């Protein structure tokens, strides 16, 4: 009977440690999610807000790499590929 209180106490301690570890990992995961999410949306916002030049020849490209090549051939060092970050109806913008 003397062993029961110490086992009960150690069980409670173990449960508290497990809960603490789970909560800390959950908070760390939420922090990473927020950090990466804001970095992605911030990058999209910056690319969407930059002044872009659109060339008819570049609009026919089918990938980001082709957009980059098309813009480089016209003297641009940057490109934005995709509907979300370009003007309506455009898929490849050079800046």
Image: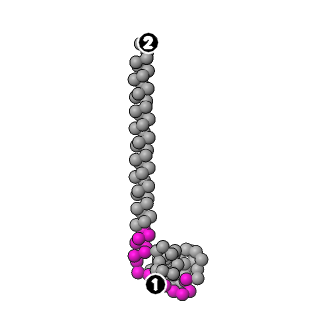
53 falls in the magenta region: yes
**Residue 29, how many percent across, how many down?**
44, 50
Residue at 58%, 80% (x, y): give it. 61
Considering the whole magenta stretch, tell me its main secondary structure: helix
Residue span colored magenta:
43-59
Residue 43 visible in the current orientation: yes
* Residue 13 is covered by the magenta coloring: no
Q: Is residue 85 above or below residue 34?
A: below
Mark 2 sits on what residue? 1
Is residue 89 toward the left or the right of residue 15 in the image? right
Question: Residue drawn 40% across and 66% down?
Answer: 42
Q: Residue 11: percent from the left, percent from the top?
A: 43, 26
Under circle 2, the secondary element is loop
For the view shown, which residue lies furthest in the top direction? 1
Mark 1, residue position: 53
SS state under label 1: loop
Give the number of the mark in front: 2 or 1: 2
Number of other residues with Cα within 10 Å of mark 1, as a class: few under 14, some 14 to 19, many 20 or more: few
Q: Which of the 4 image quadrants contains residue 17?
A: top left
């Amino acid at each position: 009977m003397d062993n029961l209180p110490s086992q009960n106490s150690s069980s409670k301690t173990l449960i508290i440690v497990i809960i603490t570890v789970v909560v800390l990992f959950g908070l760390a995961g939420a922090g990473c999610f927020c950090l990466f999410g804001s970095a992605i949306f911030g990058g999209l916002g910056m690319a969407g807000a930059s002044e872009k030049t659109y060339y008819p020849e570049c609009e026919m490209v089918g990938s980001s790499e082709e957009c980059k090549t098309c813009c480089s051939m016209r003297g641009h060092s940057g490109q934005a590929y995709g509907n979300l970050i370009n003007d309506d109806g455009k898929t490849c913008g050079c800046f």
